[in-house]
Image: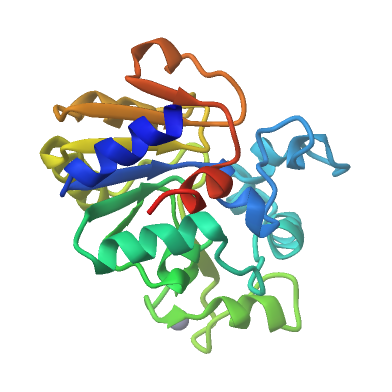
Amino acid sequence: MTYELLQQWIDESSKIVFFGGAGVSTESGIPDFRSVDGLYHQKYDYPPEEILSHTFFVRKPEEFFRFYRDKMLPLDAEPNAAHRKLAEWEKSGKLAGIVTQNIDGLHQKAGNQKVFELHGSIHRNYCERCGKFFPPEYIRDYPELVPKCGCGGRIKPDVVLYEEGLDNDVVTGAVHAISKADLMIVAGTSLTVYPAAGLVRYFRGKHLILINRDATPMDSECDLVIHDKVGQVLSSLK
Ligand code: ZN
């Protein structure tokens, strides 16, 4: 019954916005580093939240990149059923955009183009000195811990670390897409990461849907809540 209602709403919509968090990528084998069995509970000298902070990146770049190479560069990960369904919807003109908290680039790999990456992307990396861009493989394969540009500058992944602000253009684009949408699906996120979570407030459309394995603080504010895996839900839809 729930799925039939969701399908009906999707059929009636022409400007869907999908807002996704870590749970969208877990079915591609990428761990949610906020979940119980995620990175936070794996063994490192420092907690991941500290390693992935701007201060840590500046003070201990060797430790940062050791962790980053190990945990943040899943370059062989493939899009899952959720990514593929969203790519279909964009092709058929139903999907107005994707706003994601993920940095893995799997939406683009699946074929989506209208993607607002709130926390940046592991696929963009730049020299802090001259601005030259590098692919993620350059970081993965660099013979030393801290990757360097030919000019001698350090290379920084274009991902938003803790203590860093979101990119204004990305936020503006996401707000615009959300405010124009007629249906919004929030999926795979507990919506506890601010300011990203606050973006949902810009939605003025008809139906707000939440798909998440566990209950979230947002559940009571949604028109429909499904506690299940995102890929499983989306792949059952047309
Ligand atoms: Zn350089």
Place of residue 145 in the rendered image (x, y in percent of width and height, measured from the top left) = 74, 71
Tell me residue 170's x, y (percent): 26, 51
Q: Quadrant of ligand 1?
A: bottom left
In this rendering, is residue 102 above or below 212?
Answer: below
Q: Residue at x 23, y 65 (%)?
A: 92
The answer to which quarter of the image holds residue 47 is: top right
- Quadrant position of residue 66: bottom right
Task: Determine the residue positioned at 28% across, 38% down.
Answer: 8
From the image, which quarter does the N terminus lie in?
top left
Relative to 14, 3 lies left or right: right
Front-most of residues 129 and 49: 49
Q: Residue furthest bottom?
A: 150
The colouring scheme, among rainbow, by chain, secondary structure or one colour, is rainbow
Which of these two is toward me, 101 or 128? 101
Residue drawn at point x = 20 percent, y = 29 percent:
203
152 vs 210, left or right, is right
Q: Is residue 155 above or below residue 45?
A: below
Q: Is residue 105 visible?
A: no
Above-or-below relation of 192 to 156? above
Please tell me how many numbered marks the rendered image carries: 0
Q: Residue 87 in the image: state x and y as whole percent.
A: 37, 65
Quadrant, the C terminus? bottom left
- Residue 107 appears left or right of 229: left
Is any part of residue 200 visible from this angle?
yes
**Left or right: 34 in relation to 210:** right
Q: Is residue 4 above or below residue 219?
A: below
Rendered image quadrant of residue 147: bottom right
Q: Position of residue 108 (x, y in %)?
A: 41, 69
